[in-house]
Amino acid sequence: MTGTPGLQLSTTPALHYLIAGQGLAGTIFALLAAKRGRTVQVVDPEEPVTCSRVAAGLMNPISGPRLSLGEQEEAFWFAARDFYREWETVLGVRFFEERPILRLFTDAEQAERWKKREADPRYAPWYEALPPEWERRAVFGGFATKRCGRLDAVAFLDAAREWLRGRGAFRTGRVDEGAARGTTVWCLGHESRVQGPFREVPVRPARGTILTIRAPAFREPEIVHAGKWLVPFGDDLYRVGSTYEWEPGDALPSPESRAELSAFLDGFLPGPWELVQEDAGIRPMANRGRPFLARHPHRPGDVLFNGLGSRGSLLAPWFAARLLDHLEDGAALDPEVDAGRFLL
């Protein structure tokens, strides 16, 4: 692979990676490997609807109903922010924006929990007061999250694919497990349970549904999270999500998810709204909100990078770099993410 203006490639002798899957995991691993001077070949069936393409791409370090800030969130955030900023320059496409997320408490219990979080000095760099309008409107209160933002995953994945294709590093298709040679990095999402050499790793599928709506009475320019999130796209359009349906039979939106999101919108929005589009994807979920990484103990040429779940846009750059460190420098994997224990 040849160099690219604005991208400093390593001069270390090249290694080769075959990467199965061009979702967030496969794409980010490929770009980081290319930056290190490695040759890569990404193989993907180019399906129009995938989890990575449906996802909202929110990068929110204070997550979940418990408003938790993990021990490594600072490392995750700065790795993701710096990665996307660099590759926007390389690819010549805008797909990342650092912007606040207005977090509104859903009940008094959550507001009380936040009072305890505020006493923890680790939280101080990550939030500020709500804008005055929302201070008045939020029944239970809330805060504005800092060091967060959004990835336009479709724009990023499409631009990366064309960059790889232009360098002979992408082809349409699927990797044949029996024919794979050298080092193959399997990034198949929930399909890893039925394809590839890592079927034993317990990636759990969770279908998420997202609605695109038109809501002329809302007129909110910021991302709002109030149990569900709303992302503005201009012209009174918003994306709203998401839901979790475990072990789904397909990737189609369900009536139950539509009803769940509709009930939220009816109770939250100040006026009527119109459904414009409905999308769903199946997330590959791992344990405790961290992905699965592993070199297969019996097939050392096969490597796993999977299970990014609902926070893939935030987690993928950090963990892709750690996986490369493991493969090339022998750096130990965090036991929390090392999936080798399922393969012994």
Image: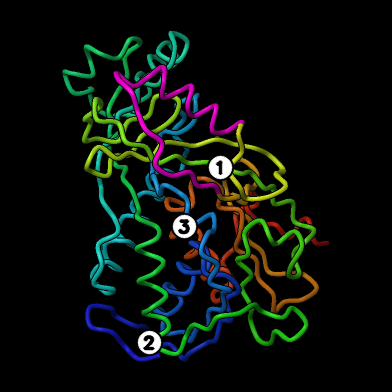
The residue that label 3 is drawn on is 53
Q: SS at mark 3? A: helix
Q: SS at mark 2? A: helix
Q: Which mark is residue 208?
A: 1
- State which mark lies toward you, 1 or 2: 1
Measured in 3D between alpha carbons, the distance from the residue under mark 1 to the one under mark 3, in whole angstroms, is 12 Å
Give, as a three-letter code, the residue at label 2: Gly
Of mark 2 and mark 3, the one earlier in the sequence is 3
Asked if labels 2 and 1 touch by Cβ distance under 8 angstroms, the answer is no
Q: Is residue 266 above or below residue 324?
A: above
Residue appearing at x 46%, y 76% in the figure: 33
Residue appearing at x 39%, y 45% in the figure: 58
Number of labelled discs?
Answer: 3
The stretch of residues the image draws in magenta is: 256-280
Q: Position of residue 131 (x, y in %)?
A: 18, 23
The local crowd at label 1, few if under 14, some if 14 to 19, many if 20 or more residues have their Cα within 10 Å, is many
Residue 20 shown left or right of residue 115 in the figure: right
Q: Which mark is residue 111?
A: none
Of mark 1 and mark 2, the one earlier in the sequence is 2
Measured in 3D between alpha carbons, the distance from the residue under mark 2 to the one under mark 3, in whole angstroms, is 21 Å
